Amino acid sequence: MVVVFTVAQQKGGTGKTTLAANLAAALVANNRVALLDIDPQHSLTQWHKLRPDSASKLSFSEVSGWRVTSELERLKAANDFIIIDTPPQIDTDARLAIRGASLVLVPVQPSPPDVWAAEGTLTLAALERRRAVIVLNRVPSTGKLCEAMVMALRQTRRPLLRALLGNRIGFANAFAEGLGITEAAPRSIASNELHAVVNELLEITE
Ligand SMILES: Nc1ncnc2c1ncn2[C@@H]1O[C@H](COP(=O)(O)OP(=O)(O)OP(=O)(O)O)[C@@H](O)[C@H]1O
Ligand SMILES: [Mg+2]
């Protein structure tokens, strides 16, 4: 069974592209993985262009419009995992990507605007009858507001991954080299966090 992770959140800068790149880099160690970039900003495409020849090979496509669905079908034939990075608005293409997902990943920084914006993506996933899960990203190591927000999300029974990603410069450093954190700094705390996220996602989609 091919697993399709669509990373979506209509708010900009929440970590969609970072999450997509890092999931791909971690999963490609043991699987056939394709990335699909449907964001016209093409940050993921830039990351992939920086990827060193020595790193594990990822299939890569950037498409838009009606080709999103056909490209997804094409990639399914030759991969175990497909990861789709979407633009910071829910347009037609993002909607098609959500429709094609096994699981929609919604990165959220623990701040009110991110959480409010996530509601729209969760609602759309529900309309498309897709499972969705919030992935907390850039979580500061201390902070009362953050703790309160995490508690509130748990209490309101929003679908929330237990594993979370801290606010770690290593993610930006790895990205600048075309790598994931598990490749660039495999023994770092950030790498452990990423592995925990991957393991939980594999449990959910098993
Ligand atoms: N866990 C993290 N720790 C530290 N920095 C992070 C983390 N996740 C993302 N960032 C940084 O936050 C910024 C925005 O991340 P990213 O580009 O992945 O967000 P995005 O949701 O894809 O943005 P856009 O909506 O513009 O596509 C980048 O500078 C990235 O390096
Ligand atoms: Mg992006």
Image: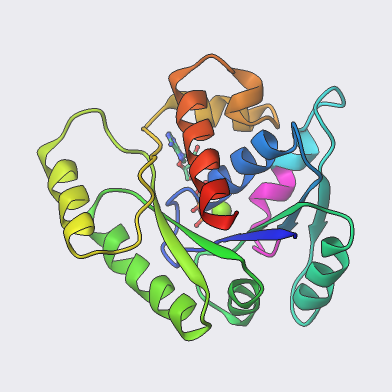
* In the image, residue 155 lies in the stretch drawn in magenta: no
Which residue sits at x=39%, y=50%?
161
Q: How is the image coloured?
A: rainbow
Q: Quadrant of residue 141?
A: top left
Report the quarter where the C terminus lies: bottom right
Residue 116 picture location, percent across and down: 27, 67
> Please, is residue 185 above or below residue 16 in the view?
above
Q: In this picture, which residue range is highlighted in magenta?
A: 37-46
Give the side of residue 111 with respect to residue 37, left or right: left
Q: Nearer the viewer, residue 31 or 24?
A: 31
Residue 132 picture location, percent across and down: 46, 65
> Please, is residue 66 above or below residue 63 in the view?
below
Q: Quadrant of residue 65?
A: bottom right
> Please, is residue 149 above or below residue 180 in the view?
below
Give the side of residue 134 with respect to residue 170, left or right: left
Q: Nearer the viewer, residue 57 or 92?
A: 57
Q: Nearer the viewer, residue 35 or 1?
A: 1
Residue 35 picture location, percent across and down: 74, 52
Q: Residue furthest top?
A: 187
Give the side of residue 198 with respect to residue 93, left or right: left
Which residue sits at x=31%, y=58%?
114
Q: Quadrant of residue 62?
A: bottom right
